[in-house]
Structures are given as C-alpha cells and as structure tokens.
Amino acid sequence: MTQNLVLSHDQPHVNKRTCNFVPQSKMFLKLAALFLCILLHKNVFCKPHNDLNNIIRNVEDIIRQSQDNLRYKPEELGLGLPAAGGGAAADLGETVNPTTGSPWPLPQQIKTTSTMLFLNKVFKFNYDSKTCDLLQMAFTRYYNLIFYGTQQVSSNADNLIFRLPKVNEPSISSMVVTMDNCPDYPTLESNENYTLSVASDGARIKAATIWGVLRGLETFSQLVYESSDGGLAVNATTITDFPRFLHRGILVDTSRHFIDVPTLLDNLDAMVYNKFNVFHWHIVDDQSFPYESSKYPQLSNQGAFNQRHTYTQDQVSLVISYARERGIRVVPEYDTPGHSQSWGSINDLLTPCYKDGKATGSFGPINPILNSTYNFLKDFFSEVVAKYPDHYIHMGGDEVSFDCWKSNPDITTFMKEQKFGDDYAKLEEYYLQRLLDIMSDLKADYIIWQEVIDNGVKVRNDTVVEVWKGGYVQEMSKVTKQGYRTILSSPWYLNYVSNPYNQDWKTYYIIEPQDFTGTAEQKALVIGGEACMWGEYVDSVNLIQRFWPRASAVGERLWSSKSVNDVPAAESRLAEHRCRMLRRGIQAEPVTGPGYCP
C-alpha cells in the first residue's frame, strides 16, 4: 500500500519545474524535500543545497528511521479492515493461484481429462455444413487470438511465440464446425446452444445457429493454454453448453461523459470474452446528445458537448456491425420524458417552467400536452427504428420530476380538462401511453424502466421491464406477477466503486435474479440482467478498467447454472480469466489480490 508523505504545516513549497525549494528552518524538511525531488523528478536537475554531501549521507538514515511511520496499518487508514494477522486482512495478502485452461463463464456441463493435445502450426478451422460471412470472420479472429493473442495479425506473421509439437507428441490440427443456420442479426430469442468436443482426432463444434458457434469458439479459445515447456496445449474435453438467461447485457452511458468509438469496440470485445450478448447503449441524457440524427441534426449540433463528442451515422453503423459480428445486439436508449434537457433544440419540445406566474427561462421534462411533441417523436423514432436492426428500443421512462409540470399554467389547465386532478402521475401515463402507441405503430418492441409499470401505465403484454431501484426483490415479484418479462440491473451498478479490499465482484457473483417470492411461471419471466456503468465519473480513460473483470462475475451469473456459486473456486478461475483478457488487450484491473500474470 502506498501512502502520501504528509509534511508539517511549514513544509517547503516545491516548484515542480526546477525543483527549487523555499528555504525552511528545519533540516528534516530540507532533506525530505530533496528526497522527494530525487524520487519524483529524477530526470530533472535539482539545484544544489548547502552541505549537499552531508545531506545525501544522512538520507538513508532518515528513511530508515521514518519507515515505521510510513507503514500505516489498515485500521488506522479507515479502510474497514481488521488488523494485520487476523482473518480477512491476512487473507488479502495471500496470492490466488490461477487455474489453467479453465473457461469463463463456466459451461453447463464440462468433462475434461489430463490428456494434453498440442496445437500444430497447420491448425485450421473448417466447416462441413453451412457457412456465412460471420463464420469466416470468426475463424480469422479466433485463429489470431489463439496463436498470437490478438485479433489482427498481418498475413506474414510467421514467428509463433509457442513451440511446435514434438515428434510423437499428441497433437491436434483442426476444428470442424457444424451449424444449421446463419441468421443475419441476433435477437432476444436467438439460440446460443452448442456442443464442443476436443480429442486426438480433432476438435468439433455443433450448433443450430451461428450464435451458438460463436460461443463455442470462445470457449475453445479459453481451453487453450501454454504448457510449462512453451507448447500451445488443450486438454481432451467434452462440453454441452447453453445460457441460463437470454438477455445478458452491459449498459454504457455515453451522455454524462463521451466514450470514444475505439473504447466502445474494446468493450464489445470484452463482452464477447464473457459471453454477454446485449449492448444497452444509453446514448443520450440530460447532459449531452451525442447522436447525430439525420433528420434533426440540431439535436447534436446544440445538444452535444461539442462537435468532437458526437457519434456520426457511420460510427453508429460501425458499432452495430462490430457487435453483430460477435453475436451482440445493440439496444439503444432514448430516455423520455425526463432526462431530456439535451433535446432542447427542438422548438416547444421541453416544458417551460414558471414561478409566481412568470416563466423562469428554465425547462423541465418533455411537454406532454402539445400535438407537436408527438409529431416530432414519431418522426424521430422512425429514424431510430430504421437505424438499429434490433427489435427492441429502450424507451426509458424513469425519474420524471413533476415540479415544472406543476408550475406551468397551460399544463394545469390541461390537467383539469382531462380530469386528472392533482395526480401528475396520470399526466406521465398519458404521455407514455401515446409514446408507446407510436412505437407500436412503428412495429418496434420496447424495454422500459420499472417506474412505467409502477405508475400504472398500460403497456403491451410483450413489454420488457428493467428493474433498477432499491427493494428489487419485491419489485421483481410484483412485475412478474403482472405477467411482464423482466431484466434485473439493481444490484449490478458497477459505477459504484467500493473499497477494493471488499472485493465487490464477490457480491455481484452471488446475486440470484430469481430469488424472490413467486411461482415457477413468474420466475420463468426473468429473462436476464445487466451490469451498468453510469458515466458521472467514467469516460474513455477508465471505462474498461472499471468494468472488467468485475462485470465478469455478472457474466457468469447470467450464463452458468444456478448451482455455480462457489466463490473460492470462481476466484482462481477469475484470476486466470483476467490474465487472459490482458493478453487480448483488455486492460482489466486486478481484483483477486496479490499475484501476477505469467
């Protein structure tokens, strides 16, 4: 643990450019200042001080005398840890030994042996049934990932970093894929099941669709490991696998901070390595509107942070295409009527706020009483539906403040005409009902936040409800009792950063989405969950590190069997998986304590 050295109130002022120190009366401060200069600015010339030789000779003694003061104990730092040598604190110092060739998330059924088979340089991916562009691109990606640790390798990359099989050493030279169908785009109901066998006569994946093949290729790539003598090996294994839940999502907020496209693509790669299949793109919000609309360019022209922080139509298409190649759906969210301050470039769209009968110049949620509002929404969402190939659009509907609506005299009059009384939840229901009717007319399916149901809005029976607020156990019971398919995100807000010594991935790992009071039919309505990253304190610099491998815990919970819940066993596999992601270029942070990646 590294701690900042805190000097007394009369510490010297440091000019970081020249390492000049304002003279002080105490020799210790001069020594400390010089020592900091040497440590922090070893390549910068520090002007000499009086009696420099004596000072340098005394530095070592002073450091030695100060070491005990610099070695703070956890309980003194307010970390909520017991004293060293007792219980958890002692465990935190133990090194977790990574597994070797163990896949993450754990397959539904896996039988592996100690028989090692070494991959040959002539190893090839083949197919004996249908093929398509998605399969061919996947073959290239996984060949490069297995042999070079990267997705893109030049055609003349002949220098392998692994040794070739020795004479008479068991080897494997091919993977054969059998699939029945290659749909163009994944859907909520996509079949991701596959079987995988690895034996001396070769490896084989069988799947009904390309989506199952992609999951099987990922698992195979994770079975491969470097042997102790530098070979590229895989153990003879048989696997039968399928996801427990259909919707396994990652939410990224690109409004509160802009996330550049390369980072979004890196995150899609990390999602594949953890078998997530939905990118929930919370693309706009109050803070900014980075989506460049083809019909309403003023939305991003005036609503984005600036014109360098926008997503062009081509960039959105790139993200969708990149995700499709990896079996990931892109579900965009355009949240209304709240969270819409960045939509203000559309005339009369937002509600003018009043105080003491006068307009304040500020604006609230989308104005629900004007026909022009719904004309715009129909035209805008017709563009959105055409742009994104997924059947679902996330319509938001959360956290609507009624204060501005209550202050507006036109809305007050409208409330009386509609006989809503003082119940502004009915006005929200009125708005959402009209908006959802528009989406039905556009033949689009939709996902909504739980407040829409909580406020009694009538929605279609096939609506998907996302539960995100506290008290989610009761909410899951309530929503599924009404017959709606449900996804859970409440306990998986990864933007909340806890003390790393608490290892919060363990908390995420043991969450059980179906752990609520309800019938078997209700629990069958839980179709998955999402790990969310809201962007108040996250941008392109730290998105990947903050997500991974903490989100990996959610990935295994949503893919693997309910019975896979042994945290100590998962810890060793997660340590290996984190190293695997690092080798593939994903800057995943360490979460299992001391250790290293071989």
Image (tube, grey):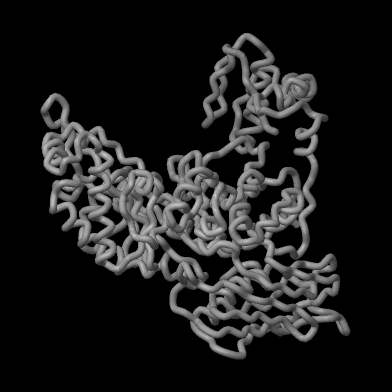
Place of residue 490 in the rendered image (x, y in percent of width and height, measured from the top left): 50, 45
Number of callouts: 0
Above or below: residue 414 compared with residue 215: above
Q: Residue at x 67, y 26 (%)?
A: 35
305 or 375, nearer to the observer: 375
Above or below: residue 330 compared with residue 403: below
Single out the residue that lies furthest toward the front: 519
Q: Residue at x 16, y 27 (%)?
A: 355
Q: Residue at x 34, y 44 (%)?
A: 455
- Give the left or right position of residue 402, taking residue 204 as reference: left
Place of residue 222 in the rendered image (x, y in percent of width and height, measured from the top left): 69, 67
Q: Is residue 276 visible?
A: yes
Quarter of the rendering occupied by the N terminus: top right
172 or 286, nearer to the observer: 286
Single out the residue that lies furthest toward the top: 25
Single out the residue that lies furthest toward the bottom: 128
161 or 510, nearer to the observer: 510
Place of residue 548 in the rendered image (x, y in percent of width and height, measured from the top left): 59, 52
Quarter of the rendering occupied by the C terminus: bottom right
Above or below: residue 30 compared with residue 586: above
Place of residue 237 in the rendered image (x, y in percent of width and height, measured from the top left): 77, 74
Q: Is residue 267 visible?
A: no
- Give the left or right position of residue 288, taking residue 216 as reference: left
Q: Residue at x 76, y 53 (%)?
A: 569
Q: Based on the displayed image, in which of its 4 quarters is residue 438 positioned?
A: bottom left
- Give the left or right position of residue 281, taking residue 444 as reference: right
416 or 552, nearer to the observer: 416
